[in-house]
């Protein structure tokens, strides 16, 4: 059992690990380099089926198990973090959109709803929506509130320090949870995957569920918060720049307004860009990096950093305590 741990990275994954270690009685310090994390713009969907990983069964199981941990994780934070279990309506517009979405719906084993049933659940939906499914297990949390709560709990454990190389850190155990920055710190293959995302402000209650849709071949999700914030996301681009582009905003707004025409009345409150930390197989890197076990990695969560934070914290805290969960086998950082 290591009693002295440094966590490199103060995003939702690094902070969740540090919080878990702190509660286990470990002497933990978070090194916050101030880099922007994907959590800052993330919508916070907890969507093990919608963000599906059918081609990677072990990742699918990891997503499901972390989703199960979210209710108790949110409750343990002790403040309101926007955990909402109203569920997700996943819908499609054209016949081609239905054909594409049906591949996911069939695997989720969810019954198809008629347009009238969909609009009964979600009156603001466009009459053009052909069909869809209700996924009660696809939930949300507000990542900005979660990170604020974690920072508050860890306030005496966070220091401002930029780490260039893992060798610089003198702690008994070092956990690198630096998102896209993990590549520079460790040399591991983590690449930035750009996402542009919008925030609108409207009447609370305009939209009742998370909406996920294929609209004329374009993918969009709409995440309504209780306070009237509506998050619309997100582009997925293999780019490293931070530009909000006219094309990106247009693509998202066009799809969202086709889906829910009343969104046209909302205020456009924020346009932003984040970078998801992707890996060659887009599954996370979780485990020991070196033979002596001093350096542990928890990075590369790609589209699922928020969803995977609770299980990542538990698995990494287990490793620090000397227990290697068999679930880690498929996510070794040494697999590439
Ligand atoms: N998890 C949603 C996204 O990455 O856009």
Image (tube, rainbow, N blue to C red):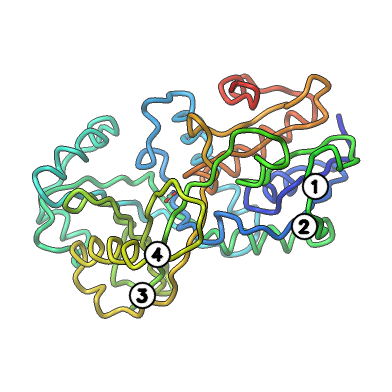
Quarter of the image with the N terminus in it:
top right
Whether label 2 touches label 4, CB < 8 Å = no
Spatial CA distance of label 2 from label 4 is: 28 Å
Mark toward the start of the polypeptide (2 vs 1): 1
Residue 86 image label = none
Whether label 2 touches label 1, CB < 8 Å = yes
Spatial CA distance of label 3 from label 1 is: 37 Å
Q: Label 1 crowding class (10 Å Cα cut-off): few <14, some 14-19, many 20+?
A: some
Q: Is residue 229 above or below residue 142?
A: below
Q: Label 4 crowding class (10 Å Cα cut-off): few <14, some 14-19, many 20+?
A: many
Residue 245 at x, y percent in the picture: 38, 65
The residue carrying mark 3 is 204
Q: Secondary structure at mark 4?
A: strand
Residue 22 image label = 1
Side of 41 where 146 appears, left or right: right
Mark toward the start of the polypeptide (1 vs 4): 1
- Quadrant position of residue 117: bottom left
Side of 289 where 114 appears, left or right: left
The residue carrying mark 4 is 231
Residue 154 image label = 2
Mark toward the start of the polypeptide (2 vs 4): 2
Mark toward the start of the polypeptide (3 vs 1): 1
Q: Label 2 crowding class (10 Å Cα cut-off): few <14, some 14-19, many 20+?
A: some
Residue 166 at x, y percent in the picture: 80, 39
Spatial CA distance of label 4 from label 3 is: 13 Å
């Amino acid at each position: 059992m290591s009693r002295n741990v440094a966590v490199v990275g103060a995003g939702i994954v690094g902070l969740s690990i540090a919080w878990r270690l702190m509660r286990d009685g470990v002497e933990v310090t978070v090194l916050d380099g101030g880099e922007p994390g994907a959590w800052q713009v993330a919508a916070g969907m907890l969507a093990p089926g919608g963000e599906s990983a059918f081609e990677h069964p072990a990742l699918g199981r990891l997503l499901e198990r972390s989703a199960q941990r979210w209710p108790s994780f949110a409750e343990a934070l002790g403040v309101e973090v926007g955990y909402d279990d109203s569920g997700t309506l996943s819908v499609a517009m054209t016949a081609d959109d239905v054909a594409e979405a049906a591949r996911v719906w069939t695997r989720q084993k969810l019954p198809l709803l008629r347009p009238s049933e969909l609009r009964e659940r979600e009156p603001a939906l466009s009459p053009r929506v052909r069909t869809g499914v209700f996924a009660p297990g696809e939930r949300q949390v507000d990542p900005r509130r979660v990170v604020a709560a974690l920072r508050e709990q860890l306030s005496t454990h966070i220091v401002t320090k930029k780490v260039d190389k893992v060798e610089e850190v003198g702690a008994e155990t070092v956990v690198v949870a630096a998102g896209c920055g993990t590549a520079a710190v460790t040399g591991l293959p983590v690449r930035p995957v750009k996402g542009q995302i919008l925030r609108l402000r409207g009447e609370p209650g305009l939209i009742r569920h998370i909406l996920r849709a294929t609209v004329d071949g374009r993918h969009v999700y709409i995440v309504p918060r209780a306070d009237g914030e509506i998050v619309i996301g997100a582009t997925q681009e293999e780019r490293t720049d931070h530009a909000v582009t006219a094309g990106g905003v247009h693509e998202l707004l066009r799809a969202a307004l086709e889906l829910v025409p009343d969104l046209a009345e909302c205020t456009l409150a924020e346009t932003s860009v984040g970078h998801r930390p992707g890996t060659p197989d887009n599954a996370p890197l979780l485990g020991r990096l070196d033979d002596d076990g001093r350096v542990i990695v928890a990075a590369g969560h790609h589209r699922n950093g928020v969803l995977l934070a609770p299980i990542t914290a538990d698995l990494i805290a287990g490793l620090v305590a000397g227990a290697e969960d068999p679930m880690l086998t498929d996510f070794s950082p040494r697999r590439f």
